[in-house]
Every structure is written in structure tokens, then in C-alpha cells.
């Protein structure tokens, strides 16, 4: 298929019938209310802290990859996971466009430098799978580079697992209608407009190409040692809860969080004399 060839609606229907054009289609269910969502999330956050302490104590090396279409909700679940954890233990990696130097390196090299040490969790907001998705569809890599990636990736991941890394891969799946709604929401909201790029706009006309690329990627890299876990993500709240709950189920852990304790009473040094307030510069209290 030509790089900039547009796909008619009839062609899309054909792909659907052949089961080539798909992301997970789920039955519509009532949106999860904010109160119920926050209650369930609170329980999961407590478990995430327990997992964090277990990872730290046992020097585990955990890599979690989040992939999916643009606006599928990857960033939201990553922020949710990291938000209640110690940033010295849980680290987010979201690499930008490779530099000229990085382009000349072994493809996996810049990702290897971001892998965890003992006692760390690394959350990849997109990963080496860029080559199997956006680079392939948008023509940013050659056919030879793409085919080499598909051959090398499963072995690369087996090497990581053999080295002791716990590797977990999530694919966030949304419908084309929901993606369009989220794009429109980003355009309308000034605080979200940075999330949509010219490449995102161009990708709207390449839904089928991305579906085919995802299918081929899965056929090579959805292995027994390193499977893909698909998260239906049309409902953001349910997707976050389901993903976090599943993540917790994959790593056996015990509760090592510190027990509650009482703080000793404050001791005031009567000899201390505070400098005059006028000697300090304060932020204006506008609110």
C-alpha cells in the first residue's frame, strides 16, 4: 500500500470482515462514577505501595511497557501508577525523537541505558516498539530495519528476562470513535492541546495500516515468555483500574510497608530567635 494512499470506507468494511481491521470491541457499559472509581483506586494504590516496598527489599528489576494507539490512555495510567510511588524507585521513561548519534547506534541501545537496576520499576511510555508501529506506518524506517526488528525483538526480550528483569507489556486498545472524541477534546482544551501533534492528525487516515502493523507485531512478539496483555480502554477509569489490578497480580509480593507509629512531641528551642519577616521575600497571596 502506498505511503500516502487514502483508504475508502468500503475498503475499511472489507478489512473488518476479514478481521484485519480491529481493536478490541467491548459491549457498552455504564461509565464508572468518580466516587466509585476513587474508592477502588485508593485500594489499588495501597497495594502498589506494598509492591514498591517488596521490589525495593528484594532488589527486583521491573519493566512495564505501555503501547497502543494515540490517545488510548497510556499516559493516564502511567501517571496514576507513578503518582503514589516513590520516584526514586518508580521511574517513567518517555524518550523523544532519536538524535543523529542515536540513529547510528544499535536500535535497542538507547532503551538499554534506561533499564532498571535492582530495586527499581521502570514504566515505558512507548518503547522499542516504536519501530513496529509509528516508524513502520509513517515510513521512518526502512523495510530492512523493520524486518530486522521483528526478528531481533523476541530474542532481545528473552535476554532481558534471562538477566532477571520482570518484563510486562500492555497494549491499550480503543475504538476509532473514542479516539476521535479524545482528539476533539484535546483540541478544545488549552491544557491538553500539547498532547496532539501533526503526526497524530496524519495517523487518523491510517487506522487500517496501524491495525495491520499491530497484528504483525503481535504475531512476532506475543510470545510465551513475554506475552502482550490487551487492555480495553474506551472507558479510561475502568482501563486504569483493570490494568493496575492485573499488574499487581503478576508479581507475587508481601506487605512490607512500615507500620503506623506515633511522632514524639516537638521540642522547641527557646534560645532561637527568628529573623524579622521583613527580611524575607514572600510569594504574593493572590488566592
Image (cartoon, helix red, strand yellow):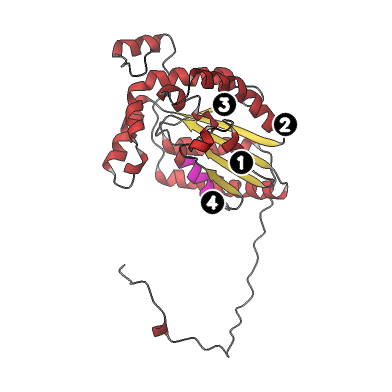
Q: Which residues are magenta?
A: 76-84
Q: Quadrant of residue 205?
A: top left
Q: Earlier in the sequence, mark 2 or mark 1?
A: 1
Where in the figure is residue 278, as x and y percent of width and height? Answer: 39, 84
Is 236 in the magenta? no
Q: Is residue 162 left or right of residue 138?
A: right
Q: CA distance from mark 3 to mark 4?
A: 25 Å
Crowding at mark 1 (Cα within 10 Å: few <14, some 14-19, many 20+): few
Q: Earlier in the sequence, mark 3 or mark 1?
A: 1
Q: CA distance from mark 3 to mark 1?
A: 23 Å
Magenta stretch: dominant secondary structure: helix
**Helix, strand or loop for disc 2:** helix
User: Quick one: quadrant of the C terminus?
Assistant: bottom left
Is 78 in the magenta? yes
Who is closer to the viewer here, 68 or 157?
157
Q: CA distance from mark 2 to mark 4?
A: 30 Å
Residue under the image location 68 percent in, 47 percent down: 119
Q: Earlier in the sequence, mark 3 or mark 4?
A: 4
Q: Which residue is mark 3?
A: 228
Q: Which residue is mark 4?
A: 84
The answer to whether residue 23 of the structure is visible from this angle is no
| Contact check, label 2 and label 4, Cβ < 8 Å | no
Q: Which residue is mark 2?
A: 162
Front position among marks 3 and 1: 1
Amino acid at each position: 500500500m502506498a505511503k500516502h494512499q487514502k483508504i475508502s470506507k468500503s475498503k475499511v468494511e472489507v478489512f473488518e470482515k476479514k478481521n484485519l481491521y480491529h481493536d478490541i470491541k467491548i459491549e457498552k457499559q455504564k461509565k464508572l462514577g468518580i466516587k466509585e472509581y476513587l474508592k477502588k483506586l485508593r485500594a489499588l494504590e495501597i497495594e502498589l505501595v506494598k509492591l514498591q516496598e517488596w521490589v525495593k527489599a528484594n532488589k527486583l528489576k521491573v519493566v512495564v511497557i505501555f503501547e497502543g494507539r494515540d490517545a488510548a490512555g497510556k499516559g493516564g495510567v502511567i501517571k496514576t501508577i507513578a503518582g503514589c510511588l516513590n520516584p526514586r524507585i518508580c521511574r517513567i521513561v518517555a524518550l523523544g525523537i532519536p538524535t543523529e548519534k542515536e540513529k547510528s547506534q544499535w536500535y535497542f541501545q538507547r532503551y538499554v541505558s534506561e533499564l532498571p537496576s535492582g530495586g527499581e520499576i521502570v514504566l515505558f511510555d512507548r518503547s522499542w516498539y516504536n519501530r513496529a508501529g509509528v516508524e513502520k506506518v509513517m515510513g521512518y524506517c526502512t523495510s530492512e530495519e523493520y524486518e530486522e526488528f521483528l526478528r531481533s525483538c523476541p530474542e532481545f526480550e528473552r535476554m532481558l528476562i534471562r538477566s532477571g528483569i520482570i518484563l510486562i507489556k500492555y497494549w491499550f486498545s480503543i475504538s476509532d470513535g473514542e479516539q476521535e472524541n479524545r482528539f476533539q477534546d484535546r483540541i478544545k482544551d488549552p491544557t491538553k492541546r500539547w498532547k496532539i501533534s501533526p503526526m497524530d492528525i496524519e495517523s487518523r487516515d491510517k487506522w487500517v495500516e496501524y491495525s495491520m502493523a499491530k497484528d504483525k507485531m503481535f504475531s512476532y512478539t506475543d510470545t510465551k515468555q513475554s506475552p502482550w496483555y490487551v487492555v480495553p480502554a474506551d472507558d479510561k477509569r475502568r482501563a486504569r483500574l483493570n490494568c493496575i489490578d492485573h499488574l499487581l497480580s503478576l508479581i507475587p509480593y508481601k506487605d512490607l510497608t512500615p507500620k503506623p507509629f506515633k511522632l514524639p512531641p516537638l521540642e522547641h528551642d527557646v534560645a532561637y530567635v527568628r529573623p524579622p519577616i521583613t527580611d524575607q521575600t514572600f510569594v504574593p497571596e493572590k488566592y
